[in-house]
Image (spheres, rainbow, N blue to C red):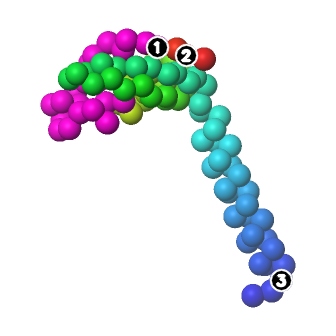
């Protein structure tokens, strides 16, 4: 393979990775911290998303992943109203 082709291939890879990283970061518009009390436990987690609702959902799913085991418990935990929510 010639030196020009190798450089062109490397440039294409760098551009592709840059586009993927930029596209991933540009969708994050909101970040939220929240606390959940479920089944006698309390967990606080952060989440980010394209809007406030998505960020809250991500944070709640992260908190429930630690406290709930099984599908039914996970669903119940995700339906609990958070005790503390702060978004930015």
| SS state under label 3 | helix
Which comes sooner in the sequence, label 1 or label 3? Answer: 3
Taking the image as shown, residue 24 lies to the left or right of residue 85, namely right
Q: Is residue 54 visible?
A: no
Where does the image place residue 63, in percent across and percent down from the top left? 36, 30
Taking the image as shown, residue 78 lies to the left or right of residue 14, namely left
As measured in the structure, the alpha-carbon distance from the residue carrying label 1 to the one carrying label 2 is: 7 Å
**Circle 2 is placed at which residue position?**
87
The correct choice, above or below, for 9 with respect to 15 in the image is: below
- Magenta stretch: includes residue 84: yes
Whether tag 3 and tag 2 are in contact, CB under 8 A, the answer is no
Where does the image place residue 43, in percent across and percent down from the top left? 37, 26
Which comes sooner in the sequence, label 3 or label 2? Answer: 3
Q: Which residues are magenta?
A: 63-85
- Magenta stretch: includes residue 1: no
| The C terminus lies in quadrant | top right
| The N terminus lies in quadrant | bottom right
**Circle 3 is placed at which residue position?**
3
Whether tag 1 and tag 2 are in contact, CB under 8 A, the answer is yes
**Residue at image point 61% right, 25% down:** 29
**Circle 1 is placed at which residue position?**
85
As measured in the structure, the alpha-carbon distance from the residue carrying label 1 to the one carrying label 3 is: 55 Å
């Amino acid at each position: 393979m010639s030196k020009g082709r190798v450089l062109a291939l490397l440039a294409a890879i760098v551009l592709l990775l840059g586009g993927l990283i930029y596209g991933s970061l540009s969708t994050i518009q909101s970040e939220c911290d929240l606390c959940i009390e479920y089944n006698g436990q309390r967990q606080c987690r952060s989440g980010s998303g394209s809007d406030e609702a998505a960020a809250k959902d991500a944070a709640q799913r992260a908190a429930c992943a630690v406290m709930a085991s099984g599908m039914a418990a996970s669903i119940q935990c995700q339906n609990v109203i958070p005790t503390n929510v702060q978004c930015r």
